[in-house]
Image (cartoon, grey):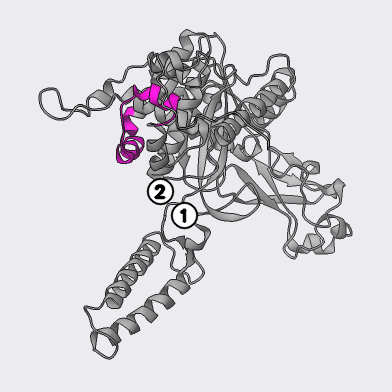
């Protein structure tokens, strides 16, 4: 019979040394703690009033470091994290081998947002002192993150009203004594469900969702249904971030309304510039600042406002590039219509004048239209406007010089480099938050919870750059 060495799994062992000697020198926990030592936790200290009386509190630096390491490991459960703080060598070292309860961890993550904002702003000057934050070129990008609510929590108004009426009938039976009684457990459960449905309908009315087909996320009204990265639709939040293109640091991050990037260019760049200005980190060069974004951010009025405030915008207008109505021949595309500045009219390739009729919704372009009879009698109608019954119309921008300046800037070497840098740095920052910081779905509820999760990841992302744990995702040689 084969013989094997005796195991010693149950043998008591005495290990000499401290947690510090047992923790490897290249542990990421040491880098996190070293980075946090450079920050001032005064805002956290103000929340504790135990100078003379009260139980001793846990060091906020330790709790912050624990949650940062948890994000790097993909841990979002306070219960699981509390267990690891008593077992894992890195978490024990960060806490100083002091026990912690899950309620303390949970409360610290969501109840110290103002103090977290202070920490986030402190990381930027530290990056600036290390030469990692010039603040001259910025890029803005956004992404959709799944909300904590389930897809099944999205309900239509007509369904909620039908369910509410059904419950009211059941409650009447209970109260009349026909089926059970008002004090029965079933009646109390029905009453609770009825109140939830009534509140959901009130929320819909307050938001102007009065049509039967209007939808609302019942458990999380601030999370509308959005298209996710996999093409499906589910409750989500729109996270926007402005990144420094020379260092990869996230200057400003915010959860905004709506599911798209439209209308976010000027607000996000403006808030990022204010952050840098308040910290004394505004552009140190003699030239203008640069801002890059993809075509979804193109907005004529916002481009005009930024250009007037000293920002060179690099935003392509590719939303309607080369797009014409079905059946329109290429020679009758909008760019082939001539404008007469003296009469403020357009002329089609066939020589028919077109007078201005109205302004568009943003008052950035005039709509010029030919008379319906002239188009009906024109032999080129099948090529120009085959499906129109009112005559061909063309929009003429009121900001031709601005749009030409922005378009020409994109064709320069510097413009092409800015767009490549935006692709690498901005999308790389969100990729790190999604993959390395495991933010594919929110685990905290409502807008405040989503804001807290974004703020934690912004701070962790920048701290990893500060400590050198992560290398900046920047464009160095003009290539991606």
Where residue 21 sits: x, y (%)? 43, 13
Report the residue that reaches farthest toward the front: 1
Pointer 1 local density, CA inside 10 Å: few below 14, some 14–19, many at least 20: many
Q: Kindly indicate whether the residue at mark 2 contacts the one at mark 1 (C-beta within 8 angstroms).
A: yes
Q: Is residue 248 magenta?
A: no
Q: At 17% from the left edge and 30% from the top edge, which residue is drawn?
A: 55
Q: Nearer the viewer, residue 326 or 168?
A: 168
Q: Quadrant of residue 450?
A: top left
Magenta part, dominant SS: helix
Residue picked out by circle 1? 149
The kind of secondary structure element at disc 1 is loop
Q: Is residue 178 above or below residue 230?
A: below
Q: Nearer the viewer, residue 157 or 274?
A: 157
Where residue 119 sits: x, y (%)? 37, 23
Report the residue that reaches farthest toward the left: 52
Residue 277 visible in rendering: no
Residue picked out by circle 2? 445
Residue 427 horizontal side relative to residue 102, left or right: right
Q: Quadrant of residue 316?
A: top right
Residue 38 horizontal side relative to residue 418, left or right: left
Viewport quadrant of the C terminus? top right
The region drawn magenta spans 87-115
Viewport quadrant of the N terminus? top right
């Amino acid at each position: 019979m084969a013989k094997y060495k005796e195991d010693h799994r149950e043998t008591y062992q005495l290990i000499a040394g401290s947690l510090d000697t047992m923790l490897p020198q290249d542990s990421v926990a040491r880098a996190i703690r070293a980075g946090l030592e450079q920050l001032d936790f005064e805002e956290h200290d103000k929340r504790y009033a135990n100078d003379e009386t009260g139980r001793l509190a846990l060091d906020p630096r330790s709790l912050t470091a624990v949650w940062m390491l948890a994000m790097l490991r993909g841990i979002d459960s306070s219960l699981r994290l509390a267990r690891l703080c008593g077992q894992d060598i890195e978490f024990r070292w960060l806490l100083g081998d002091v026990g912690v309860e899950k309620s303390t961890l949970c409360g610290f993550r969501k109840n110290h947002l103002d103090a977290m904002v202070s920490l986030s702003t402190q990381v930027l000057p530290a990056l600036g002192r290390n030469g990692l934050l010039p603040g001259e070129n910025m890029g803005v990008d956004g992404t959709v993150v799944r909300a904590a609510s389930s897809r099944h929590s999205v309900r239509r108004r007509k369904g909620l009203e039908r369910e509410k009426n059904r419950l009211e009938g059941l409650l009447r039976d209970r109260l009349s004594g026909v089926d059970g009684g008002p004090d029965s457990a079933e009646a109390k459960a029905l009453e609770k469900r009825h109140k939830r449905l009534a509140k959901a309908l009130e929320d819909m009315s307050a938001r102007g969702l009065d049509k039967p087909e209007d939808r609302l996320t019942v458990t999380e009204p601030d999370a509308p249904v959005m298209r996710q990265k996999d093409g499906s639709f589910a409750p989500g939040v729109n996270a926007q971030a402005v990144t420094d293109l020379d260092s990869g640091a996230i200057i400003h991050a915010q959860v905004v309304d709506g599911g798209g990037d439209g209308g976010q260019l000027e607000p996000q760049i403006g808030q990022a510039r204010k952050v840098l200005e308040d910290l004394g980190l505004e552009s140190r060069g003699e030239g203008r600042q640069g801002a890059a974004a993809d075509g979804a951010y193109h907005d004529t009025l916002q481009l005009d406002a930024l250009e007037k405030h000293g920002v060179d915008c690099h935003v392509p207008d590719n939303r309607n590039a080369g797009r014409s109505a079905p059946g329109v021949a290429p020679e009758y595309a909008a760019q082939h219509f001539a404008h007469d500045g003296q009469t403020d009219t357009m002329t089609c390739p066939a020589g028919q004048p077109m007078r201005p009729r109205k302004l568009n919704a943003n008052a950035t372009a005039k709509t010029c239209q030919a008379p319906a009879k002239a188009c009906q009698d024109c032999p080129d109608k099948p090529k120009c406007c085959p499906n129109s019954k009112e005559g061909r119309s063309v929009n003429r921008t009121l900001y031709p010089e601005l749009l030409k300046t922005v378009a020409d800037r994109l064709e320069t070497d510097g413009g092409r480099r800015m767009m490549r840098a935006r692709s690498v740095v901005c999308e790389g920052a969100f990729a790190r938050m999604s993959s390395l910081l495991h933010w594919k779905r929110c685990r905290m509820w409502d807008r405040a919870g989503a804001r807290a999760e974004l703020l934690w990841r912004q701070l962790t992302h920048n701290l990893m750059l500060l400590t050198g744990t992560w290398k900046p995702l920047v464009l160095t040689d003009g290539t991606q």
